[in-house]
Structure formats: structure tokens, C-alpha cells
Image (cartoon, rainbow, N blue to C red):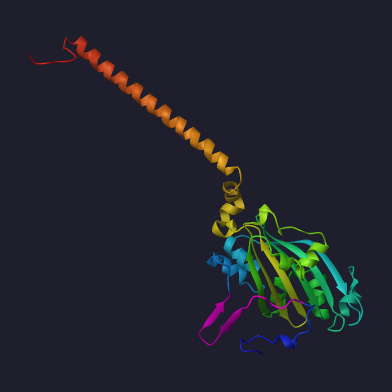
Amino acid sequence: MDSSGNPEASSYPPALNLPTPRMSSYESYNAKTTSISYPWPTGVTGIERIALSAQGDLQRILCAFFSRPIVIALVYSHTLRQSTPQSPPEPLTFPNPQAVASASPSSPITQTRQVHLQCGGKIACTATSIVRISSPEVAHLFLEEKYAIGQMFRRLEKVPAFELLSVGLGPVEKNEKDQGLGSSLFSSGDKTHWSGRESKNQLWRKYKLFIPDFECEILEVFPSREMFLDGEGWLAGKTEQASSPSSGKDYDVNFTIRLSRTRQSFILITLVACILVAAFEGVLLYSGRAVNCHRA
């Protein structure tokens, strides 16, 4: 055990050539105090820091934030197995009870996968992961019973060790794409959320979670920071409509309409005032009184 109460990384099987963390992270606690400190990018809000600090329970945090169910939808998965430490990885197809039963530190199963965390029919987060499995029990839960990564820790009743590797605003940085998860994604032809105008308002993080026999490196991309400002509005599409490229034109049109209505109202008020004055003068003439009276 390390000083924070988590198992030491050395007690786990070797990782899949995961990159050395670039972003220092620090978390500590004692009997009465908890301290979490990360070098967050400038402008990251409190609610965003909560999501970025999630340690295998992002689905639960988003569920509490939106007050709606969060559903995991699998986009793709590619599963490999090494029969020996020296042999190259071989693709696996399922069902495959023999491969599941033979999972071990010397014959691990790895899977590259991408899922969408969906809320109200919208994608709240895209999570792409490399998972390493080295026991039959874990392999059975993850590959056969189809537990998602976050649910695995709850099902096994274990708190994972957590290492935040990097956090960013806008497009995922190029050096992130050139190594680890990024290279796997681009080799599979998936370029979703990586660049372009749509990604300028997104938020992302890269991190690792691990318990004995189950290691994960995960890249999560939140498509729009607007979701953390107005969750209900974002789900309803109101924030996207307000920030769309046509919103400026719509504002100009609405402003012109408002000016036209103001001008019409002014003319109408002036016309009514003239009618009232004319009616008043007519009443005076009818009663025999002069409209303009001047003393001699």
C-alpha cells in the first residue's frame, strides 16, 4: 500500500506500454482532510473539475448532474489475446470460453473499445479505452456478462487506483493522437471529436485506472462545455441553437423586425394623438368657443 491508501502500481501486472504521465497529479487524505490538486487548464469550471476527477464513476456523476439515466452504448471493440508473453497478440471472437478461462498475467486479454455515454438521446461523452485483463473472473464479467468499465469496479467492490495523464480544451492535442490510444484510434479510421470546428468547444481528459487483473487507459471527450453550463438546455438543443453560426444572422433579422415594430408603434401613437387633438378642437368649435383665445 502507498501513502494514499491505494495499492502500489508495482503490485499489478505490467501495463501495455502505456505512456509515462506528462501531467503531474496529486491526491492525498488523512483522518480528517482530503486534498485534490491538478494543474487544470485556465477557465475550467468547478463542475467540469468534478467530471474530470471521476475515478471510474463518471456515469454516476453525469446521472446525478442531469438527473436522468446515463446509458452506455458500444460503438466498437477489438479484442486480442497473447497465448504466451513472447507471442504476438491474436484476434479473439466470442463466445470463447476457453480464452476467457485461460486469461492470466502471462496470457492476458486486451481490448480496444469505444462507447458513448448517452443521456436523453444525446452523447454526453465519448470514451475510448485500452483494457488489459489477466484473470478468468474479470474476463468473464467484462467479456461475457458485458459489464462496462465503471460497473466492473462496483461489481468487484474495489476502488481503482487513478492517474490523470492529461486534460485539455478544444481539439485533442496532436501528441496525444500520436501515441497510445490516439494511434489506435487513427489506425481504426475513427477521427470523431479529434479536430475541426465542432471540437473547439469540447473538453477532454486522458487517464488510467487499475485494480489487480484489470487495467484501463481511457480517453474521454465531452463534445460541448455548454452541457455543464445548462444541462437541460443542452439536452433540449437550446444552447447549440444559440451558438450556431446562423445565430448572428437570426439576431440581425430579429433586430430589424424589432426596429420596424418600434417605428410602426411610434407612427400609430402620433396618429392617435393627432386624432385626439383634432377631436378636441372640433368640440370647441361646435360649442362656439374659439380654439385659440387671446386677451386684447
Name the side, left or right, on which 63 lies relative to 90.
left
Q: Residue at x 81, y 59 (%)?
A: 189
Residue 41 is a magenta residue: no
Name the side, left or right, on which 191 lies relative to 59.
right
Nearest to the observer: residue 82 or residue 160: 82
Residue 230 visible in the displayed image: yes
Q: Residue at x 28, y 16 (%)?
A: 278
Nearest to the observer: residue 183 or residue 109: 183
Q: Residue at x 75, y 77 (%)?
A: 215
Nearest to the observer: residue 41 or residue 247: 41
Q: Residue furthest front?
A: 175
Q: What is the chief secondary structure element of the magenta stretch?
A: loop
Q: Position of residue 228 (x, y in %)?
A: 57, 60
Instruction: Reply above or below: 132 against 244.
Output: below
Name the side, left or right, on which 65 lies relative to 103.
left
Instruction: Reply above or below: 283 against 28.
Output: above
Residue 57 visible in the displayed image: no
Q: Position of residue 10 (x, y in %)?
A: 73, 88
Instruction: Reply above or below: 182 against 27.
Output: above
Quarter of the C terminus within the rendering: top left
Quarter of the N terminus within the rendering: bottom right
In which quarter of the view is residue 144 placed? bottom right
Residues in magenta, as a range: 18-38
Nearest to the observer: residue 46 or residue 103: 46
Q: Position of residue 73 (x, y in %)?
A: 74, 60
Residue 22 is a magenta residue: yes
Instruction: Reply above or below: 56 against 114.
Output: below
